[in-house]
Image (tube, rainbow, N blue to C red):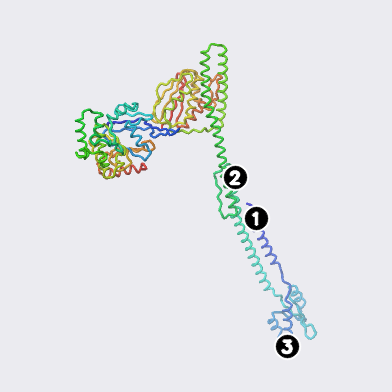
């Protein structure tokens, strides 16, 4: 399998007064192209820190991160911003939609940072909105008029408008009720089917079930991983295996 | 033990008393007769005789006595025999004339019976006394002596320095209150001993770390003096610089002595490896790069290592200072990352290290043949080995172009 992200000896430390606190410790991971990778672990285990380091939103203290063959860990902030804009899409628990813009503009704002072809971007945005189940009536709505699930789907469209190589999602269903969460997960599963690589952090087992690879984090170290790739979606075995795995990990 | 002997002696003496009493009772003989009964019998015999119709034989049967008449030939013999047996001999008179004697046998049957009963009673009483004694002593043993023995063992443990063994005592015990305070005494003793130990240790550690901290600036002073000695031309200034240098050397020696003396006492030095970033290693070399002779061939691979900063500093200090002392050449430092460790190679180009001495350099107090009056205690590499192994790493060395030290520092 082709690896899209590779991490070597990744460490992230925060200084806590005079004491350095090591959140990520000598981490070595490969993220494969086309995978739906989920990072799990108890609170404080370093899940989000890992996601931010992987996505270039935060710089590692030591260690190197390779995006394909490009080492991004040495980049300065500007180069990192360009890298993120070009190659990464982000979905957060809080959607961070711009409240003063309508749905379409919110999406175009992201798209026009990379491409100058407004017409093409607009049609792509409409197409994508269609595919996540939002019809024309929603184009002119403002974020405050959307339900949580709809807003998150808009955020997903914004994340994938530039056809990023990898989408990072930090608890995308954390703030949603279960129906909306399922809708959003369906969208994520769908874009993954279409070849989109996704790395997602969650502590919800239902969300984790969508992944085909689960990394379990404990005290800043990946202690084990679980592959669900061989099971069909909705297969009872898939759920059982995940549950067994999480039990072993002390979930 | 003592209690046992007491019980044994008591039981034995009681048994002996019992045996003696039995013997004594057996030896007793009964010689007295019931006078009233005898008189009564005599009276009745006389009454019966006066009726004159009864024969001697029937009288003998009736009163279980015997008549011997004077006229009988055996008279004297029988009489003395009867007296010997302790029987009562009465005169048998008719009118005022002595005809014979009436012999009434002493009632020995009931006496034998009495003796038997007496034996049983005495035996029973002695048995009873024995049982009472046993019960009392076992009670005493359980309630008093056993706790005392526990107490003794406890005190013994304390005197041997085992302060961890608690004294368990039942509350209803007579010594319950005492034992509790004894146990509290033990706890206090333990606490104060621990506190004393800690205080002592931290004092020594303070001295050890202080002397290490003083060493670095002194080394800088020395290095600067050496530079000034080359640069300065004036005679006056040169002598002064020389003095400064000499004094700095004295200070260094004193600190070394102090440091090693405390280390000696400390013996088991505390090594507390923590998760540290590997980037802290390079500054440790830079800190003692007084002569600018240390060259880095590459950068430290970034990762987390197990390392005690202070100890790591001392390890590097000792290695580099050895090189300064014995080689005095440039020092090359290179880093390499392997699966579970970072490898640090420190290499100098002095040709004075001797291959045969390599296996000995990590020994305590071992000093190579090349010391030539340079100061030191032969502890540097010994300590370096202790420290680095305490962090889960290892150290080895060999001779190449000079002396090479390889450090393995464990990764997290």
- In space, the residues marked 1 and 3 are separated at their CA atoms by 72 Å
Label total for image: 3
Comes first in the chain, label 2 or label 3: 3
Quadrant in the picture for the C terminus of chain A = top left
Using a 10 Å C-alpha cutoff, classify the residue at mark 3 as few (fewer than 14 neighbours), some (14 to 19) or many (20 or more): few
Using a 10 Å C-alpha cutoff, classify the residue at mark 2 as few (fewer than 14 neighbours), some (14 to 19) or many (20 or more): few
- In space, the residues marked 2 and 1 are separated at their CA atoms by 26 Å
Residue that numbered label 3 is attached to: B52
Residue in view at x 39 percent, y 28 percent: B302
**Which chain contains the residue that carries disc 2?**
B
Residue in view at x 34 percent, y 42 percent: A246
Residue that numbered label 2 is attached to: B156
Whether discs 2 and 1 lie on one chain: the answer is: yes
Residue in view at x 70 percent, y 86 percent: B54
- In space, the residues marked 2 and 3 are separated at their CA atoms by 98 Å
**Which chain contains the residue that carries disc 1?**
B
Residue that numbered label 1 is attached to: B6
Secondary structure of residue under mark 3: loop
Label 2 or label 3, whichever lies nearer to me, is 2
Whether discs 2 and 3 lie on one chain: the answer is: yes
Using a 10 Å C-alpha cutoff, classify the residue at mark 1 as few (fewer than 14 neighbours), some (14 to 19) or many (20 or more): few
């Amino acid at each position: 399998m082709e690896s899209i992200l590779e991490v070597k000896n990744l460490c992230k430390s925060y200084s806590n007064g005079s004491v350095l606190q090591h959140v990520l410790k000598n981490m070595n991971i490969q993220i494969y192209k086309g995978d739906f990778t989920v990072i799990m672990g108890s609170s404080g285990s370093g899940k989000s820190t890992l996601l931010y380091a992987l996505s270039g939103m935060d710089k590692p203290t030591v260690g190197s991160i390779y995006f394909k063959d490009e080492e991004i860990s040495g980049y300065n902030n500007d180069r990192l911003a360009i890298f993120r804009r070009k190659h990464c899409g982000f979905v957060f628990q809080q959607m961070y939609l711009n409240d003063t813009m309508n749905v379409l503009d919110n999406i175009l704002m992201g798209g026009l940072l990379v491409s100058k072809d407004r017409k093409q971007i607009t049609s792509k945005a409409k197409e994508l909105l269609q595919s996540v189940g939002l019809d024309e009536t929603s184009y002119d709505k403002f974020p405050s008029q959307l339900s949580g699930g709809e807003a998150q789907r808009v955020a997903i469209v914004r994340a994938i408008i530039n056809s990023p190589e990898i989408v990072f999602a930090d608890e995308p269903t954390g703030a949603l009720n279960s129906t909306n969460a399922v809708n959003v997960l369906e969208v994520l599963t769908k874009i993954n089917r279409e070849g989109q690589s996704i790395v997602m952090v969650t502590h919800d087992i239902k969300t984790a079930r969508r992944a085909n690879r689960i990394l379990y984090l404990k005290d800043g170290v990946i202690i084990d991983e679980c592959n669900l790739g061989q099971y069909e979606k909705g297969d009872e075995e898939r759920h059982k295996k995940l549950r067994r795995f999480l039990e072993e990990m002390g979930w | 033990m003592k209690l046992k002997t007491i019980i044994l002696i008591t039981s034995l003496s009681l048994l002996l008393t019992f045996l003696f009493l039995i013997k004594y009772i057996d030896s007793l003989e009964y010689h007295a007769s019931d006078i009233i009964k005898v008189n009564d019998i005599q009276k009745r015999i006389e009454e019966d005789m006066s009726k004159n119709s009864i024969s001697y034989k029937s009288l003998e049967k009736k009163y279980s006595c015997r008549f011997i008449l004077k006229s009988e030939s055996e008279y004297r013999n029988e009489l003395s025999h009867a007296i010997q047996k302790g029987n009562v001999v009465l005169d048998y008179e008719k009118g005022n004339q002595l005809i014979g004697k009436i012999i009434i046998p002493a009632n020995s049957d009931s006496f034998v019976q009495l003796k038997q009963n007496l034996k049983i009673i005495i035996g029973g009483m002695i048995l009873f006394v024995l049982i009472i004694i046993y019960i009392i002593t076992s009670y005493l043993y359980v309630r008093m002596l056993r706790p005392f023995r526990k107490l003794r063992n406890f005190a013994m443990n304390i005197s041997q320095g085992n302060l961890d063994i608690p004294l368990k005592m039942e509350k209803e015990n007579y010594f319950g209150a005492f034992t509790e305070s004894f146990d509290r005494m033990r706890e206090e003793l333990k606490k104060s001993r621990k506190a004393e130990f800690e205080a002592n240790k931290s004092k020594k550690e303070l001295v050890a770390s202080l002397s290490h901290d003083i060493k670095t600036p002194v080394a800088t002073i020395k290095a600067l003096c050496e530079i000034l000695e080359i640069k300065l031309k004036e005679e006056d200034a040169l002598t002064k610089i020389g003095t400064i240098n000499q004094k700095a050397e004295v200070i260094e020696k004193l600190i070394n002595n102090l440091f090693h003396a405390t280390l000696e006492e400390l013996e088991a030095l505390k090594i507390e490896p923590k998760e540290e970033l590997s980037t802290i290693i390079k500054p440790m070399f830079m800190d003692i790069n007084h002569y600018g002779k240390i060259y880095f061939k590459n950068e430290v691979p970034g990762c987390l290592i197990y390392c005690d900063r202070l100890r790591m500093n001392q390890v590097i200090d000792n290695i580099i200072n050895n090189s300064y002392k014995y080689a005095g050449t440039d020092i090359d430092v290179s880093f390499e990352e392997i699966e579970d460790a970072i490898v640090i190679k420190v290499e100098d180009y002095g040709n004075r290290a001797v291959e045969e001495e390599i296996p000995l350099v990590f020994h305590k107090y071992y000093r190579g043949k090349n010391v030539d009056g340079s100061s030191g205690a032969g502890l540097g590499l010994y300590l370096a080995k202790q420290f680095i192994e305490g962090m889960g790493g290892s150290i080895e060395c060999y001779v190449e172009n000079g002396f090479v030290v390889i450090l393995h520092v464990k990764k997290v």
